[in-house]
Image (cartoon, coloured by chain):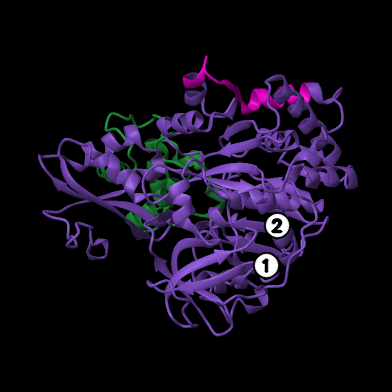
Chain colours: A green, B purple
């Protein structure tokens, strides 16, 4: 299941961000890949794809700075 | 001709440096620039600008010279901008996302003799060719020299209102970004207009989140300083709780934004959690603010007036606005012309159209640019008998309010950034497996529009390969987010792609 989530996140990053490479590790920084405008696209994708509800007070760009961080957000704020 | 408010509009200062001198003289102990952890008074900012002028002079920058400022918002940007203006030099300003090759081309084309940037790749590439300084180092030098510096240099009397203040690069319709020459007079006019209709005062604290390299962001800085108000420089909109806490704690009274910001704030901002009662006005430009967002903002921020505006870089960012008291009645409009600005709608044969009929929007007035840098033919095509052909399609209602209906020029507007489809097509067509290509904007709920490429293959190529290829040549925001492979592109008899069929 974890692999499936990572696969979907990676697929989104690949489709949306030109600098994404499959070789990017789970703890590697996404700086230079997810740009400032892309952050909100990413959050929008996570909300729709994984049914998460993301509270305002948790909205720190650092939480989305690695694939590992994104997967933690999905686990933490999954509502179903 | 449909024109509004044609009474002449008096602008007293002839140039930007005069505005600065007056502001520093009259408001020396008032806050000028406020950051999360530091605040500078007008006197302190004046000293920094004076020190910066001396540094630039040491590099032989004087009247008629050009310096480039390329990077994110930073105090050094503001200090260097005004230092150049005080010396009678002009600033060359480019979007912070542009590719290295584009930036190098602009530096070469404009013949700048000093580059201030936060881009390490640009600094490295220019080493040995043009003097280049990082934002941080430049600011440190200014701070170091500011204590023993002289007052602001005064050569303003010799700076004419027709002289270039800035060359602002913006996406055109035919490929690479074009340099829009904006004069001292353009800025002085627009500053006076905005100060007037936003009713700015010394008590205001204007939140700056828009890029300074865009004229819209620049006018936030210029209008605030012109009136003796404070600019609150907020550098991290993406960190929403932090951003909103700062708007609250700094008691910001105004915020200028694009609809993308409204969407994000309304969706993820949890605005009711913060005391934003200090906000008395929010302005929007770039794209039309969706009427639903107007309603939501009025509900969430009842104390803030909403200004919906229209303009383009070529009109020094501003041409029309909807007075806030009419925002509900004219929810779909982007406003009526500023006093002193004329607006008309023309048909395909060039004749002026009556209200209700859709045609191209033309503007005339002191806000219209001098022209495009090194592009006399394009300038002649764009400014005809003083009228700026905006490339936007729209109509006027019986009250003279403008409604936009589309564009004659192909420009994608992504989160307030202008993107030229032609620039992206020119890159993709050079890929060996691409036989034909067309690029257009596709609607996106967050960004307004995103770049969508339609590809006819001449060999086998995957989406991923095209993404990597584009990433090497285009800045992030220009890389197509979507690709569709098609057998053929629908074209007119003259070979033009019928993009509306894609």
Q: Quadrant of the C terminus of chain B?
A: bottom left
Q: Which residues are magenta?
A: B125-144
In the rendered image, residue B142 lying in the magenta stretch gets the answer yes
Q: Which residue is mark 1?
A: B340
Q: Secondary structure at mark 1?
A: loop
Residue at 57% x, 57% y: name it. Answer: B315
Q: Quadrant of the N terminus of chain B?
A: bottom right
A9 in relation to B414, above or below: above
Q: Secondary structure at mark 2?
A: helix
List x then y, in percent, for residue B131. Answer: 59, 20
Subunit that carries the residue with mark 1: B
Residue farthest along the bottom direction in this orientation? B398
Res B155 quadrant in image? top right
Residue A41 shown left or right of residue A22 in the figure: right
Q: Nearer the viewer, residue B358 or A3?
A: B358
Q: Nearer the viewer, residue B215 or B278?
A: B215
Residue at 44% x, 41% y: name it. Answer: A35
In the rendered image, residue B64 lying in the magenta stretch gets the answer no
List x then y, in percent, for residue B203. Answer: 82, 56
Q: CA distance from mark 1 to mark 2?
A: 9 Å
- In this rendering, does residue B399 appear at all? yes
List x then y, in percent, for residue B317. Answer: 58, 56
Q: Which numbered marker is on residue B318?
A: none
Subunit that carries the residue with mark 2: B
Residue at 61% x, 44% y: name it. Answer: B212
Q: Which residue is mark 2?
A: B189
Q: Nearer the viewer, residue A37 or B412?
A: B412
B347 in relation to B16, above or below: below
Residue at 69% x, 38% y: name it. Answer: B78
B26 in relation to B147, above or below: below
Residue farthest along the top direction in this orientation? B128
List x then y, in percent, for residue B152. Answer: 83, 33
């Amino acid at each position: 299941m974890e692999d499936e989530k990572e696969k979907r996140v990676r697929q989104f990053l690949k489709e949306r961000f030109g600098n994404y490479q499959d070789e990017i590790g789970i703890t590697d920084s996404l700086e230079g890949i997810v740009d400032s405008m892309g952050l909100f696209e990413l959050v929008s994708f996570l909300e729709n794809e994984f049914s998460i509800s993301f509270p305002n007070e948790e909205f720190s760009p650092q939480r989305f700075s690695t694939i590992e961080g994104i997967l933690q957000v999905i686990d933490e704020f999954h509502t179903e | 001709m449909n024109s509004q408010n044609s009474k002449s509009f008096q602008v007293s200062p002839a140039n930007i440096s005069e505005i600065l001198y007056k502001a520093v003289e009259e408001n020396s102990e008032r806050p000028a620039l406020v950051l999360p952890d530091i605040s500078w008074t007008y006197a302190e900012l004046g000293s920094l600008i004076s020190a910066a002028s001396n540094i630039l002079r040491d590099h032989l920058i004087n009247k008629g010279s050009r310096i480039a400022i390329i990077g994110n918002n930073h105090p050094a940007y503001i200090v260097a901008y005004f230092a150049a203006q005080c010396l009678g030099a002009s600033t060359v300003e480019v979007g912070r996302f542009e590719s290295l090759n584009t930036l190098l081309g602009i530096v070469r084309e404009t013949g700048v003799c000093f580059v201030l940037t936060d881009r390490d790749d640009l600094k490295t590439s220019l080493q040995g060719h043009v003097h280049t300084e990082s934002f941080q180092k430049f600011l440190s030098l200014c701070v170091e020299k500011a204590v023993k510096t002289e007052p602001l240099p005064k050569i303003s009397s010799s700076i004419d209102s027709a002289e270039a203040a800035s060359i602002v690069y913006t996406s055109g319709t035919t490929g690479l970004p074009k340099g829009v020459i904006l004069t001292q007079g353009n800025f002085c006019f627009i500053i006076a207009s905005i100060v007037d209709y936003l009713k700015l005062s010394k008590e205001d604290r204007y939140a700056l989140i828009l890029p300074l390299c865009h004229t819209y962001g620049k006018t936030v800085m210029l209008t605030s300083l012109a009136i003796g108000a404070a600019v609150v420089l907020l550098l991290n909109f993406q960190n929403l709780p932090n951003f909103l806490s700062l708007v609250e704690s700094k008691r910001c009274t105004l915020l200028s934004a694009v609809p993308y910001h409204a969407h994000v704030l309304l969706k993820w901002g949890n605005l009711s959690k913060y005391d934003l009662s200090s906000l008395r006005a929010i302005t929007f430009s770039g794209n039309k603010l969706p009427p639903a967002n107007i309603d939501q903002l009025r509900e969430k921020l009842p104390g803030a007036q909403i200004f919906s505006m229209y303009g383009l870089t070529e009109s020094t960012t501003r041409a029309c606005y909807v007075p806030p008291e009419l925002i509900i009645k004219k929810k779909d409009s982007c406003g009526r012309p500023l006093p002193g600005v004329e607006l008309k709608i023309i048909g395909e044969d060039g004749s002026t159209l009556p209200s209700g009929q859709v045609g191209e929007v033309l503007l005339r007035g002191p806000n219209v640019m001098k022209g495009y840098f090194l592009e006399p033919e394009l300038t002649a095509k764009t400014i005809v008998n003083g009228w700026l052909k905006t490339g936007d399609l729209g109509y006027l209602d019986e009250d003279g309010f403008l409604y936009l209906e589309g564009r004659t020029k192909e420009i994608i507007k992504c989160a307030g950034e202008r993107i030229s489809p032609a620039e992206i097509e020119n890159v993709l067509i050079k890929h060996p497996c691409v036989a034909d290509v067309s690029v257009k904007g596709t609607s996106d709920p967050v960004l307004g529009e995103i770049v969508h490429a339609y590809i006819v293959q001449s060999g086998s190529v995957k989406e991923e390969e095209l993404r990597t290829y584009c990433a090497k040549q285009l800045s992030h925001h220009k890389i197509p987010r979507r690709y569709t492979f098609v057998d053929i592109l629908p074209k007119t008899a003259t070979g033009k792609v019928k993009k509306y069929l894609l």
